[in-house]
Image: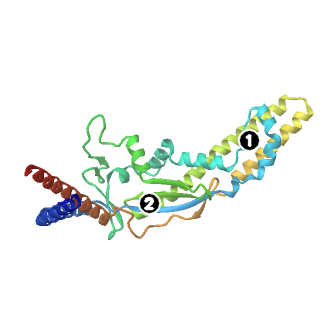
Amino acid sequence: MSNSDSLDYSIRTLFYYLIRRWVYLLGIPFLISVGTAMWTLSLPNVYRSEALVAPSQNQSGELSSVTGQLGGLASMAGISLGGKGAVDKVSLALETLTSRSFLLNFIKENELEVVLIAGEYWDDRERELVINKEIYDVETRTWLREVEPPRSSTPTDSELYESFLEQLVVEKDPTSGVITISVESLSPLLSKEWLEGLVTEVNKVMRDRELSRLKGNISYLKQQVSQTEDVEIKTSLFGLIQEQYKELMLANVGDEYVLSVISEAYVPDSKYGPRRALIVFLAAFLSGGIVACFLTIGFVTRKQGTK
């Protein structure tokens, strides 16, 4: 018998060997699929809300030419005109959005600790988020969860931050500059509410920082004006002060200081996850492949043992 005939014979023999053991080949993946399906049914639905934002028009290069002309003097005066443009402010806003201090402040101001840690599932009939009674007692407002030291029953700041960060997704299109911000939650209502709150709050934080910077610059420049007798330097300083007042005025125009909403957050009408059908399919496929591999190894071992 030639090598090709021998190989063909071995493949056919293996095929019939696997067919005769169809109970293992099909039964084990079936049982695993059933178990996986039951497990996925115990997982709560997760809902995702998305919003599209872009750099605010207030951050356009309206003052860039003036900044270029007066930048040298400003540097000599020891102040920043903020002339690097909208890109830097937007990048800083996105970094702020995912920062620990910002998210913890947002969580605590909106009292999200219980929802983040003790939320169990969304009751679509009652339109409310069900709290796990084994983790938190709503009536006594007491944490009941059992954790290993050094953690306590009350969630730490690290737990709260990590839990929220896992539900927040920020993606920036490098071509258009449009930013997609997504928030996942067990509640479709909360996913929209949190997303709107985050965009509003990061704009407020960035505006407050800018206002503080500009007011500090103006105060410092006025002090420098009062201390110099040179008319030319005074004129230049007055020009700097005027531009700082212009930026101050722009910073106070509207609520969308850095991020302007293109597409508003929405209440999702269907779950984002878990993808139960895909999980069950992968479990069946992988378990079937593993069983087939074990049967093939057994076949090869028996064949070598008969030689």
Q: Is residue 198 above or below residue 226?
A: below
Which residue type carries mark 2?
A: Ser
The residue beneath circle 2 is: 191
In space, the residues marked 1 and 2 are separated at their CA atoms by: 37 Å
Marks 1 & 2, CB-CB < 8 Å contact: no
Whether residue 6 sits left or right of residue 48 in the image: it is left
Q: Amino acid at mark 1?
A: Leu
Q: Secondary structure at mark 1?
A: loop
Using the image as rendered, state which of residue 64 and residue 147 is in the foreground: 64
Q: Position of residue 67 (x, y in %)?
A: 78, 44
Q: Residue furthest right?
A: 231
Instruction: Residue 42 in the image: state x and y as whole percent.
Output: 25, 61
x, y percent for residue 17: 13, 63
Q: Earlier in the sequence, mark 1 or mark 2?
A: 1
Residue 81 marker: 1
Q: Residue at coordinates 60% horizontally, 45% vertically from top-left?
A: 92
Q: Is residue 297 left or right of residue 259?
A: left
Q: Residue 76's image quarter?
A: top right
Q: Is residue 125 above or below residue 200?
A: below
